[in-house]
Image (cartoon, rainbow, N blue to C red):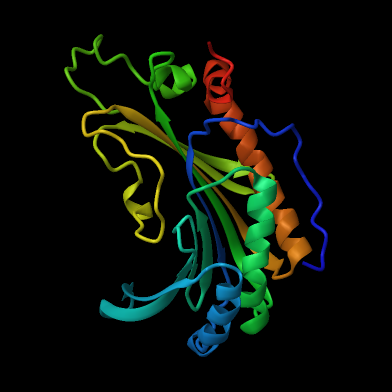
Amino acid sequence: MENQVVCRRSEPALELKTSPLVLVLTQLRFPTFLHMGKCVGDIQDSLRKLGLIRFTPEETQELVFGPEFKQRSTTRWVFSNRARTEAIVLANNFVVCEVSQYDSFDNYLARMLELLEPIYRTAELVYCEQIGMRYLDLLRGSNKLSADEMVCESLRGLNAKTLGLEESNYQFVIQGTTPHGTLSIRSFENTGTQFLPPDLQTEHLAFGVKVDEKELFRVIDFDHIHRGEVDFEGEALGDKLWSLHDHTDKAFRQVVTQAAIKYWKGDVS
């Protein structure tokens, strides 16, 4: 990448040994380019050289609103690595970078910019209109801490026993503006083998975690969206993504407890 991206981290990285993070994705929306399909061959060739050797075209249905409801078929293209731990989803008006293995934002950002460059160079994309970053954390209890004890009290909800409830699933949602965009935080507890929210169900990625049918777990879903034009160019994208990440990182530190952070760092004996 010809442009140097400046680190915008306001606090030292947490460096968790057993991070609860299971999915990170970034979506960049740009003005519709109807001839994207003509560029896919060259884009695939570039991405294969960068390790994304899997390729799958997908047909999706979307509703078109107007005097009459209509369904329109659209195509998107999925590029992923052999292990299915990282993937690019490309359509004629957006691109998504998603990973199920993540060690640091520095490495994630560098890799994402590397994968995006052949896309916006080949398709001659000038700018994106919206950038969203989403982080999904799966909190699982242990003999050291319960999933409840991993989140701050305001996310734990009312006491089910006090309410006389035999079974309960608590959900929490907050949304507001930040200096960089709109931040949504959703938290829910659930049981079963599916821990991804319905809108994030994906076959593009493989996940290294499995939950038991009767296991009670918590999910924290951070979604930070910037609406406004940002040039498709390494430095501009990197600066904006650092801003979105840094504020989300601060939110994460407020949502989880210090006991949870110590546990994930391996400091709990």
Quadrant in the picture for residue 30? bottom right
Q: Where does residue 26 sit, x and y in percent of width and height?
A: 55, 57
Quadrant in the picture for residue 65? bottom left
How many tags in the picture? Answer: 0
- Vertical position of residue 9 compared to residue 77: above or below: above
- Residue, x 71% and y 61% (percent of image)? 237
Quadrant in the picture for residue 170? top left
- Residue, x 42% and y 75% (percent of image)? 76
Front residue (pair 259, 111): 111
Q: Where does residue 125 sit, x and y in percent of width and height?
A: 65, 79
Using the rendered image of the protein, determine whether residue 108 is visible from the camera's viewpoint.
yes
Q: Where does residue 62 sit, x and y in percent of width and height?
A: 33, 73
Front residue (pair 54, 251): 54
Q: Is residue 264 left or right of residue 5?
A: left
Q: Where does residue 109 sit, x and y in percent of width and height?
A: 66, 54
- Vertical position of residue 21 compared to residue 31: above or below: above
- Vertical position of residue 191 compared to residue 142: above or below: below
Q: Quadrant of the N terminus?
A: bottom right
Using the rendered image of the protein, determine whether residue 171 is visible from the camera's viewpoint.
no
- Vertical position of residue 255 compared to residue 193: above or below: above
- Residue, x 74% and y 69% (percent of image)? 233
- Residue, x 52% and y 47% (percent of image)? 101
